[in-house]
Image (tube, coloured by chain):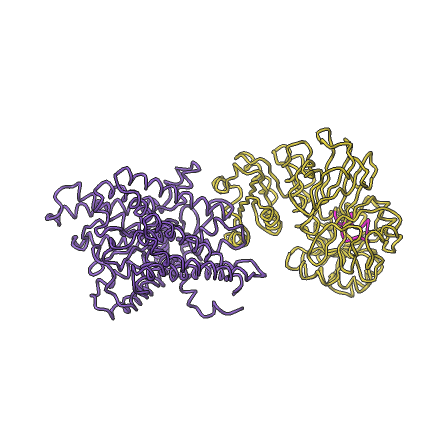
Amino acid sequence: MNYKLVINILGKTLFICGLLLCIPFGISFIYNEQHLWQSFVYPIAGLFAIGLVMLLIRPEDKTILAKEGIIIVALTWVILSLVGAIPFVISGAIPSYIDAVFETVSGLTTTGASIITDVEALPKCMLFWRSFTHFIGGMGVLVFVLAILPKSSGSMHIYRAESPGPTSSKLVSKMSYTARILYTIYVVITLIQVVFYLCGGMPLFDSVLIAFSVAGTGGFAITNNGLAAYGTYSQVVASVFMFLFSLNFNLYYMILIGNVKKALKSEEFIAFAFIIFASIAVIAIDLLVSCKQFYTNFGTALKDAAFHVTSISSTTGISNNVNTDAWPTLAKSILLFLTICGAMAGSTGGGIKIARLVILFKAGISDVKKMVRPRTVTTVKFEGEVLSPETIHNTHSFLTLWFALVIMSIFILSFDKYDLFSNITATFACIGNVGPGFGEVGALKNYAGFSGISKGFLSLLMLAGRLELFPIFIMFQPTTWSKS
Amino acid sequence: MRLVIVGTGKVGEKMVEFFTKANHNVVIVDIDYKTVETVVNKYDVKGVVGFGLDRSVLQDAEVSSADFFIACTPRDELNVLSCVMAKKLGAAHTIARVRSPEYFEEVETISNFLGVDMVFNPEYRTALEIANILKFPFAYNVENFAGGKALLLELHVEPNSALSGNTVEHIIGQAGTGVLFAMAKRGGKVFIPRGDFVVEDGDILHVIASKDQIIGFCKKLGLYKRQSKNVFIVGGSMTAYYLAKALESTDTQVKILDIDEKRCQELSQKLPKAVILSGDGTDTNVLDEERLKDADACITLTGIDEENVIISLYAQQKKVTKIITKISRPAIISLVKNLGLDTVLSPHAVIANHILQFVRSSQSNSGLAINALYKISDVGEAIEFTVTESFPKRGIPLESLKLKSNLLIGGIVRDNEFILPTGKTVLLSGDKVIVVTTKSDITDLEQILR
């Protein structure tokens, strides 16, 4: 491990974290919350001071190897979570540090699982920071660092560890341009979204924060009854944008360079679109048939079905004050399935990712064919390209580790007071970065009732989910930290 | 600038290294998934896995907007064909590698007809380079400017040589004949030496002079070695064939030793003047019997780097005047640096230089394009331009020109005569001027001005 290099790059990252914290600090002046200055000044000063010291350590060898890249990503996320929680504690918005860490991790990983029962009581600057973490975490901190940092060799390892999906490739030949293109697309669609909310009469502050929440596919609301506070129009707009943010950003780039045909032909896109539209249709009908006491007209059923399907499949998990826990079992099963699947690779969403499911499905078929006829030679293709055995193997290991973590989580959570189903859905919702589950962690409830240990483990689970497991496992592997 | 490089073997990777260092946009295409992944991890490039002739692969690599398309897969035909394809898809310039002698002799005609802008042959280039060095065995490396009227020579300062411990001014005074000290390299640092620069053991010096001047200079300082007339080549590779061909016109006695009898048969048919020997070059008995120690020069061109190094070390022990070692793998080049082997040549570096020259000369838009370009110690460059009417500062003494820093006018060739520039020298239309710089951003002559 090249410690000097890791420390140096983490120093740069700390600096950027400090700059990011300046934004909610500025917001506190707009809303006359100067009395909270300590909540920001202390961590900002700390980040700049420590960052500066770390920058003084200059590595002799500046090549980022795979191991260093992954560790840089893992540590950045851990540090950002631990530091990002400090303002909540100092301001008294969330008095317990472990709760504050849970909330920050949930924000950064764009999970949107909350332990706050009364969000409306939070100061505006804290609300802003809470939602802003979604925006930061959505596209990734280090992708942002790559966008502004001068070229360094080995940046591919960092990009690969932070951007979601089984395979990551650059859009253009240079890493910094790729990162800039991704961030530009991200910011522009977010701005368009803000304009749509404003047109619907939503206040500016709320529009921006909801837009952050949807863009990062996080799901923090800023009112106690979620989007229900803003009427149907905003919910429809949110549904559309949640869908847009759950798409692979490569598709937007393809469309931008005029290759619409190729974008629409993407296997992953077709699979994803099919899952979404089929789910919406089935749930809407199910609601009309089995839930007659709430849903009498098709319009409302369709709206709520579309809202929750896009919300869960994009792994946003934002609330519109509809209790999905009371929905019929079929609808709930579909939502649980979507929680596990997640969004497309290369989006801001979480979950296992449709790309992996498609790969697993195809590899499964090919394996079955081989079992029937052992001499058959098969190749597995994805998006028109032959998949290397490594990629398939990697996808299988991902699934294995995913199950291992899920089972571990179910055991750890079982020490708490909740029922098994609630614990299972809480696990899925956290590892998939969705937020709400069912039962005790349903759409209208929150995670406040879990013990400190459970909250700590769920935080780790959310980080593991966002970074796609491997970086977190590698961080806990002792040999990673050896010098040689 | 956007480049697409198809085939990332040793030559391909070397070029990726060059062009990413110069901050260009590079996309690589290779059939092998692993190779692509390795290169993408190492350099800031985009990688596409696929066959170099496949339309969709080339489209993925955005060939249509490429300024340069370079094909260097192991297959000659494929390289030429994919250049044709790339041209059709809209690539501005196409470059193909063609290696085998059977194709290479006629390839110019074919490729001109097909619209391939440049064909390169690493083995052929390397052979020409070796032939050139053999004319000046006292130099580590030699490059030609203005058709050989001006030379750029790389001299390695050996312990107790007449150079070490003296200032540049003193050396020039002692030699009596003019040469220009263009660049010096010490401990990884490359710079333009001034008159008060003290030369030390182990320094690498680059000097510019005419042929007579450098010979006079070296004779005075006791560095001179006669042109090699009796050349012993170990390894009957393609490079050996091209080298023997190039030496045929000079009255040089060439011996080629190769282990493969069939290859020896082939060579003896093609090279009637050369002595072809069949035997194991790594066997010192064979080398002794064939009287390696009487040769002026030993050139190791087998396909195995390690064998080349070992044979060269043996030749060194036998005090052969000039030893040239071909090494292909970059890792081995850096390893043998401290062995004190004489000239070490890497075909990939030679050819990357050649391509760089082509690429840079196509970049100029003012009609003051590059004629020739050589990399000096990977950092500096020596570039030849022709002064034309469009150069605004003609007739002005060099001392009153505002030149960029880290840049030097290294020599002028006027009416086939080499002129060593002084402060009073002026540039005239038709002059060939050699510019030495430690930067790598100059694409036309006007850019030397501040």
Quarter where residue B160 is shown: bottom right
Q: Is residue A128 left or right of residue B92?
A: left
Residue B357 or A52: which is nearer the viewer? A52
> Depth check: A392 or B23 in front?
B23
Taking the image as shown, residue B361 lies to the left or right of residue A215, namely: right
Residue at image x 28%, y 62%? Answer: A427
Measuring from the top left, give residue A403's x and y in whole percent: 32, 63
- Tally the numbered discs: 0
Residue placed most toward the observer, B115 or A72? A72
Magenta highlight on residue B398: no
In the image, which residues are magenta?
B129-141
Chain ID for purple = A
Above or below — where is B54 with respect to A98?
above
Q: Taking A91 as reference, is B409 above or below it?
A: above
* Screen quadrant of the C terminus of chain A: bottom right
Residue A378: tell me if it is visible.
Answer: no
Task: Examine the image and state in which quarter residue A369 appears.
Answer: bottom left
Residue A478: give x, y in percent of width and height. 45, 70
Rendering colour (chain B): yellow
